[in-house]
Each structure stands twice: as C-alpha cells, then as structure tokens.
C-alpha cells in the first residue's frame, strides 16, 4: 500500500513528508527508509532549482554589464533610451557655469531647462532638448548624474524631490563672451578667444544665433530654413572658409623652417603689383578704384605686414620644398581631425590633396584661395602655437565637474596637443605678426610702413600681434574678412608671455582690415579697459 502511495499522484511530487497518520500500520523501519528517500529527493531538487537561478542571474548580469560597458556611449547617446528618462526621473539636470560661477544653464524641480543669458552662449553651451548640442550634449553623462553624499540623497528622498545633478564649470568668461557677442553685432560670422598657454576657450560666439530657451518651438523652422543663415551651425568650430591671407602665417612658418636666414635677407620687389611665373601671374590687392597696390622693394616683415600676394606667390612657387611643406601642413592638422573634443569641421589643404599641383594652383595655395579651407577654431590653434613658442595646447571648454554641494569630482587640466613648429620659427613669425599691427618708419624709403592691422598701433594696455585676411569666393559675392592674432600685456616687453589669442571671421564682410580688425580691437580694448 505504501508503495502505491509514494508512486501515485498527487504525492508523486515527492516533497511531501508523510506524517504520523500516514505511517499507521506501516513498519517503522520501512517508514524511516521512505522518509529519508523523500527528503533526499527534495533536497536535490531545491539545490538544483537554486543553482539554476544563480546561473541564470549570473548570466544576465554578465550580459547586461558587457552590454553596458561595450555600448555605454551608444546607450547614453540614444535620446529616447529609458536610462536617460530614468535618470531624469530621479535627478535634476546639473548646472552649467561660466568660469566666474555665473549660471549659464539650470533646471527647475520639474527638470525644465533655463538659459538665463538667452542667445549669448547658445552655440558654446548648446541645448539639452532634441538630442542636445554643445556642452549640454558633450557633458550629458556628468550633468544627469548626482554624486551628492548619501545623507543628502536621503534628505531629498524625505522631501520627495529629485537629487541635484553634478555641476559643470566651463572656461568661458562672461565679460569676454559679452564683448565678442556685442562686437560681432548683426553680422554673420564667428569669434573665438583662447588662452594660448593653456588652451582654455574663453569666448566662442557664432552668428546668427538663437535662443535655446525656445528651441523646441523654433526647431522645425531652423532645420528647414533655406536662407543660408544656418542658425544652428557653430561657425567657430563647424564652419570652414578659405583662409585668404591669414594663410601667409603658414607660408612664413614653412619658409623660416627651411631657411631661417630669410628673416634678414629675403627681398622682393613688388614693382607693379604683379608676380609672373611662366604663363601664370598673380596680383596684389586691388583697391576700390580697381588699381593694384604696389609694395615696391620689401623684406619679409614688410611683405607680411603689407600682405603682399606677389611676394608670397614667389615664396611658395620658387623657394619652398613642396614635400616638406606638405609635412608641415600635416603637422598643423590640415586634412585630419583637430585635437578638440566637441564636434568640429576638418580643414582641407589644396597642396595635400593635389600631389601634382600646377603653378596656378600653387599661387592660390600661397594666398589662401582655391580649395584650401579652414575653420576659425583651426586658425586660432595655429595662432596659439605661434604665440606659445610653437607648442599647441589642446583647446578645451570644460574646467571642472563638481557635485551640487561644490565637492570637486573631476578637474580638466591643460594638455599639449603637439609641436606645430620649432621655437625659433615661432619667435620669428611672432615678429612678423607684430609688424602687421604697427606703423613703422622705414629708413631706406624714409616713409612710414602701415601694417594691414595698424589700427592696433595706438593700444595703451596691451601689445597686439596678428594677421588679416580677405578671402574671395564665388564671382559676385563679397569676400570673407579675417583677423587672427594675440596679445601681450603692455607692461611686458614684446617678447612677453601671450595672454589672449583671438580669431574673428566675418562672412561676406569684405576686406579683413576694414571689417574684422575693428571687431577684434573693440573686444580687446574693452577687455584691457581701454
Ligand atoms: Zn605686393
């Protein structure tokens, strides 16, 4: 009978331990054997089931960790992923601050995002909505996480409020950004101001601009706008333009690397404002009356200060070693990604792309025309390297991340990107850039020599160095106006430490010295309290 009991349903499951009533009439020794067998079977099944769960759980953990590690950025960059939403549910997005602590972006308790300076920082700081841009997008991970102490989190739990996310402090200077924004006015273009010794970006303005507070309502309009305004484009980093005569900085670097004595003994006679090489010719700047400027006999500093096209066409077509020049261009980040963490455009060099370049195109390379194109950020980097003795510091815009309670989590330190030219060359190019901003007396001719940015000649509190550029494009349109340069404190000598590096680009702005120089000067005059 007991055999039947343990074999037949419903006790077949075997985990039921027979009680005393079940054992009535069955010999004790038989009962003990039976009970022990049932217990063993039960234990085995419990252990097996438990092991199954452990194995399954471990497998899932490994899978999700691997997935999360390998695809962390992908997970995080998906705007609609549940992790973002989950983080936003628990945490209030952190603040973005200027270098002086001013709030550039903050969120309320319901995670609505506000930008107190409206359009002023729109391209640099960006926006968090619609996938994000600028620092908002780049630092999303840090802003959405909260690293306040556990006790503070408990206090938030008690009050049933979100944990405050981490704060991101930028390198951006509120005053300098305001000066740059105001100086550019309603013009299309970009201004970028950096610190050459560290690579800190102090100001970054692109126009036309937009109000990130209302971005969602305007999005469709901006996205489909065909006017060429390209409001959402950060022209400072993502716009590329022919560099015009600012490219003569690069020509000069190459000439002085190949032949340092050229700083003393270079000589060129721009006798009728035209340079001819075989069938090809190039002319110097054509003024508003249609006449070509004639620069007469010049040394290198004069040719650079006057921005003499003929002299530089001669240098590039006759004096330079093409292959060495190509290597220099590669070292200067042409045709490759810039050392910068946020989205930015690659510059292109006609010389690198055309291995069998014609004399005509080589002349175009010399004066920054043709298919050579650079971004204002890249031109600023080249200028920073000249100012900093040839060493380029990697440009960066985030200084540190801290908890909402002010505890430092991560400090971003200056980093070298590379050496763009040797120190001796940098020093000589620096002297050329000083000649551009001066009015110098020429003993040979007995005449004053006006550099193309000689408006800087009267500055009181700082010494300016620079290069202008006028980049022609298309047939009927205006030219783009460029200025790129740096400053030294007036109490220092001309060889003193560089303080600010500034690059101004005005789209369709006309002549660089007419349009871009006054903008750069206005910004620097205000900064130096002039
Ligand atoms: Zn000339």
Image: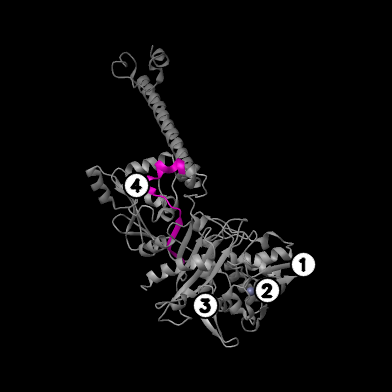
Nearest to viewer (mark 4 / mark 3): 3
Q: Which mark is residue 113?
A: 4
Name the residue rendered at 40%, 71% in the picture.
Answer: 525
Nearest to viewer (mark 3 / mark 1): 1
Residue 204 magenta-drawn?
yes
* Quarter, ligand 1: bottom right
Residue 171 makes an appearance in the image: no
Range shown magenta: 199-221
- Determine the CA span between mark 2 and mark 3: 20 Å
Q: Is residue 11 left or right of residue 192?
A: left
Q: Which mark is residue 434?
A: 3
Name the residue rendered at 28%, 50% in the picture.
Answer: 150
Lower position in the chain sequence, tag 4 or tag 2: 4
Outermost residue toward the front in this view: 289
Helix, strand or loop under label 1: loop
User: Looking at mark 1, is its residue's CB closer than 8 Å to ligand 1?
Assistant: no
Q: Is residue 230 left or right of residue 247?
A: left
């Amino acid at each position: 009978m007991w055999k039947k009991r343990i074999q037949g349903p419903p006790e077949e499951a075997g985990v039921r331990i027979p009680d005393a009533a079940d054992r009535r009439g069955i010999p004790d020794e038989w009962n003990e054997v039976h009970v022990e067998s049932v217990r063993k079977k039960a234990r085995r099944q419990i252990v097996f089931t438990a092991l199954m769960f452990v194995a399954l759980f471990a497998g899932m953990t490994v899978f999700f960790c691997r997935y999360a590690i390998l695809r962390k950025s992908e997970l995080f960059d998906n705007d609609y992923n549940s992790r973002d939403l989950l983080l936003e549910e628990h945490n209030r997005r952190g603040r973005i601050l200027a270098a002086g602590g001013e709030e550039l972006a903050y969120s309320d308790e319901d995670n609505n995002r506000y930008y107190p300076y409206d359009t002023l920082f729109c391209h640099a700081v960006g926006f968090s909505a619609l996938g994000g841009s600028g620092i908002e997008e780049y630092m999303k991970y840090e802003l959405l996480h909260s690293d306040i102490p556990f006790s503070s989190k408990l206090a938030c739990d008690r009050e049933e409020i979100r944990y405050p996310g981490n704060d991101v402090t930028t390198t951006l200077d509120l005053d300098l950004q305001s000066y740059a924004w105001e100086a550019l006015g309603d013009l299309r273009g970009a201004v970028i101001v950096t610190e050459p010794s560290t690579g800190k970006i102090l100001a970054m303005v692109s126009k036309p601009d937009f109000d990130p507070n209302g971005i969602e309502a305007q999005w469709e309009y901006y996205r489909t706008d065909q006017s060429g305004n390209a409001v959402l484009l950060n022209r400072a980093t993502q716009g590329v333009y022919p560099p015009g005569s600012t490219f003569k900085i690069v020509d000069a670097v190459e000439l002085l690397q190949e032949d340092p004595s050229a700083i003393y003994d270079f000589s060129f006679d721009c006798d009728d404002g035209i340079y001819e090489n075989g069938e090809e010719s190039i002319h110097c700047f054509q003024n508003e009356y249609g006449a070509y400027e004639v620069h007469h006999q010049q040394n290198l500093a004069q040719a650079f200060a006057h921005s003499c096209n003929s002299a530089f066409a001669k240098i590039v077509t006759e004096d330079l070693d093409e292959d060495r020049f190509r290597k220099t261009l590669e070292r200067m980040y042409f045709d490759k990604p810039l050392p910068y963490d946020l989205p930015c455009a690659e510059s292109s060099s006609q010389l690198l792309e055309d291995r069998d370049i014609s004399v005509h195109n080589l002349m175009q390379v010399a004066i920054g025309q043709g298919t050579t194109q650079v971004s204002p950020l890249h031109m600023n980097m080249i200028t920073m390297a000249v100012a900093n003795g040839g060493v380029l510091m990697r440009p960066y815009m985030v200084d540190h991340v801290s908890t909402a309670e002010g505890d430092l989590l991560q400090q971003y330190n200056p980093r070298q990107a590379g050496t763009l030219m040797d120190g001796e060359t940098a020093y000589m190019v620096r002297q050329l850039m000083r000649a551009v901003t001066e009015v110098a007396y020429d003993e040979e001719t007995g005449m004053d020599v006006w550099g193309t940015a000689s408006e800087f000649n009267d500055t009181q509190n700082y010494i300016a160095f620079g290069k202008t550029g006028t980049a022609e494009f298309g047939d009927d349109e205006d030219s783009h106006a460029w200025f790129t340069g740096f400053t030294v404190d007036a109490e220092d000598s001309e060889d003193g430490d560089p303080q600010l590096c500034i690059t101004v680009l005005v789209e369709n702005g006309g002549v660089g010295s007419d349009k871009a120089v006054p903008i750069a000067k206005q910004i620097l005059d205000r900064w130096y309290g002039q």
